[in-house]
Each structure stands twice: as C-alpha cells, then as structure tokens.
C-alpha cells in the first residue's frame, strides 16, 4: 500500500511545559499535565512518491478539513521530524505528506500537538510498526514536546514521554476565546529558550512539581465543588507563573493584550462573586482557554452573551 493516514487531537496543558532540559530531544524541565481536546483534530496522509527525491509537505484537500497554510519553518520542522522517524525505522522512500486541521488555522490555536501526534501515527503505519501509546508518545515528543500528551485523555508528562492519568471526572466542555488572531511574535519554541533568563526560572521546576502533584490528587478523585475551586486556583496560578517568566526574562515580552486582561478580569470577578466559574488557562499566546462542567450552562450563556459577538469562540459540543 502506498497511502496511510491518521488523525490525532490537540491538548490543553493545565500544568505547563515551559523550559527544556534538552533542546535537541524536547525533554521538559518540569512535569506537565494536560486534558485532550477530542474535538480539535489534525489529519495526516502519507502518499509514497517514487518520482521525487525529497519529501514534501502539502495541504490536505478533503471535505470537513480546513485548508492549511504552513509557513516555511513549520514545514521544515514537520519534515525533519518525519526524516528522524524514517532514519530510526530504516525507511528510504520519498513521501508527500498532506495535513489539515478541522479548525481554522488563523485562530491562534496551536495545532502542533495534534499535527505531530498524527504524523507519528501515520508514519508508524507506513513503516509497519506497532507501538504502545507510551512508546508513540516518546517518539512524538521528538517532533514537538507537547504532542506527547495527545495520546491520553488526561496526561502526565514527566520525563521522556507521557502516561495516562485515570480520572473519574465527567466529560468537560472546552472553549477557546480568540481575542487575537495575529501571528505570534515569539513562538513557543523560542519562549522555551528565553524563559531560562528569568530570575524566577530557577525555582520554576519546584513550583510546577508541587502543582502537578496537587492537581493529580484532585483529578484522580471524584469531582467535588471544593476540588473544582481548588483546581481553578492551581491552574490559574500556573499559567500566571508561566506568563510571569515571559514578562521577567532578559528580553521581556508579553502575550497578553488589553482584551486578554478584560476577559480575565470578568472571570476573576465571577469566581469572586459566585465562588464558581470555569477553569481558566492560557498557552503561549493572548487567547484564553476555559473549561466548564456540563452543569454550568447558565455561566456559559452569560459568557457567550458578553463576549460571543466580540471574539470568535471555538468550543466543544
Ligand atoms: C506553552 O510543544 O510547542 O503550549 O517542544 O518546542 O515544539 P516544542 O514546544 P511546544 O510547547 C508548548 C508550550 C505551551 C505549554 C504546554 O503545552 O505545555
């Protein structure tokens, strides 16, 4: 067979991977925890091309998959990871690599986790290798660190690959509030390097380890009102911690815009007044991720009413 395809999902980090102990191998400086976003997907198709002497990336054109425009450096990162896999498994063919997401590529949502996890799986099919989820996670990490968490619904990534956290929590709803679609001036790969010059970086692993331990305890127990509020506190301090690293490193920068701050302010107030609200986090960008329980539909409609006309909201279910 000359064609292979695979799909994989994005994930959102609740404890963040920021800073690497090895830049080459994408080994993290601290543990991270994520929830998979099963509705945000990438599809990768590999087509053998005997007429080419190089591998090529091309946008996948299929119904329901949105046309992707990967810039040069993203294409290079994707192709060079594929070549690492080829070398590892002794494949000398040349391939056209097609990919697309089922969400818009200009919406500021990172698709690297889903892309690299899908590429890993498609490549293994092409090379006729069957690996466990843990082994696939380790391989995928070499392409882009955060992709190693996309193999599990709830993932803990501590070392060279992620493992599953078994959680009794019910299915949650995810919202990405897109306050800006502008291309980021600093990519997350650059941010990983820059944060190391922050005076707060030295103790960063200790803080992340502590939060990861606490959050694991919470999400492995049945969901209670109290634990939801605790999870909110941990997850909020965690993304603020990461953003403080950006804002205090040598060439300090910030992803937050006044729109970001307005939304965060609203959510903080809501939590203060109602002692309830969504879990709130941000990645290396200006957009805000919200995680709601299914019985918070009133809060969801209030949020939509206030911000739904102003900003694009990408949401599950
Ligand atoms: C802020 O996985 O994109 O989203 O390993 O260099 O490809 P590379 O970095 P990447 O970093 C993601 C950083 C983050 C936090 C997270 O997802 O944990």
Image (tube, rainbow, N blue to C red):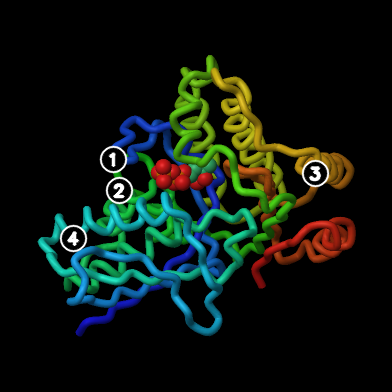
Taking depth in this image into account, of 305 and 274 the one nearest to the observer is: 305
Q: Name the residue under label 1.
A: 25
Q: Could you say whether the residue bearing mark 4 is in a helix, strand or loop?
A: helix
Of pointers 1 and 3, the one earlier in the residue sequence: 1
Give neighbour class at mark 3: few <14, some 14-19, many 20+ (Cα, 10 Å).
Answer: some
> Can residue 301 be seen from the camera position used here?
yes
Of pointers 2 and 3, the one earlier in the residue sequence: 2
Of pointers 2 and 4, the one earlier in the residue sequence: 4
* Real-space CA distance between mark 4 and mark 3, rounded to the nearest whole angstrom: 44 Å
* Real-space CA distance between mark 2 and mark 1, rounded to the nearest whole angstrom: 5 Å
Q: Residue furthest top?
A: 199
Please name the residue shown 34% across and 40% down the image.
Answer: 26
Residue 44, image quadrant: bottom left
In front of the other: label 2 or label 4? Answer: 4
- In contact (CB < 8 Å): disc 2 and disc 1: yes
Residue 247 position, x and y percent, is 63, 25
> Can residue 216 be seen from the camera position used here?
no
- In contact (CB < 8 Å): disc 4 and disc 3: no
Of pointers 4 and 1, the one earlier in the residue sequence: 1
Q: Mark 2 points at which residue?
A: 142
Residue 101 position, x and y percent, is 51, 69
Give neighbour class at mark 1: few <14, some 14-19, many 20+ (Cα, 10 Å).
Answer: some
Q: Mark 4 points at which residue?
A: 86
Q: Mark 3 points at which residue?
A: 259
């Amino acid at each position: 067979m000359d064609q292979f395809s695979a799909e994989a999902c994005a994930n959102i980090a609740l404890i963040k991977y920021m800073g690497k102990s090895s830049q080459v191998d994408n080994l993290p400086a601290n543990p991270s925890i994520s929830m998979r976003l099963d509705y945000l997907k990438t599809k990768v198709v590999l087509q053998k091309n005997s007429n080419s002497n190089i591998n090529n990336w091309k946008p996948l054109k299929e119904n329901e998959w949105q046309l992707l425009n990967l810039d040069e450096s993203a294409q290079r990162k994707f192709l060079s990871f594929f070549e690492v896999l080829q070398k590892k498994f002794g494949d000398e063919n040349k391939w056209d690599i097609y990919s697309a997401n089922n969400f818009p590529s200009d919406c500021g949502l990172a698709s690297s986790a889903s892309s690299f996890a899908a590429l890993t799986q498609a490549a293994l099919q092409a090379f006729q290798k069957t690996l466990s989820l843990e082994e696939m996670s380790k391989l995928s990490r070499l392409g882009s660190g955060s992709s190693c968490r996309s193999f599990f619904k709830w993932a803990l990534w501590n070392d060279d690959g992620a493992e599953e956290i078994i959680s009794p929590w019910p299915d949650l709803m995810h919202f990405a509030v897109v306050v800006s679609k502008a291309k980021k001036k600093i990519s997350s790969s650059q941010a990983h390097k820059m944060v190391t010059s922050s005076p707060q970086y030295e103790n960063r692993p200790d803080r992340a380890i502590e939060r990861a331990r606490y959050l694991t305890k919470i999400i492995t127990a049945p969901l209670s009102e109290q634990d939801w509020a605790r999870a909110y506190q941990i997850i909020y301090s965690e993304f603020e911690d990461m953003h403080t690293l950006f804002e205090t490193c040598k060439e300090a920068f910030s992803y937050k815009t006044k729109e970001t701050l307005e939304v965060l302010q609203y959510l903080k107030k809501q939590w203060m007044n109602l002692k309830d609200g969504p879990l709130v986090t941000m990645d290396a960008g200006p957009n805000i991720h919200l995680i709601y329980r299914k019985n918070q539909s009133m809060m969801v409609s209030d949020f939509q009413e206030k911000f739904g006309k102003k900003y694009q909201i990408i949401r599950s279910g």
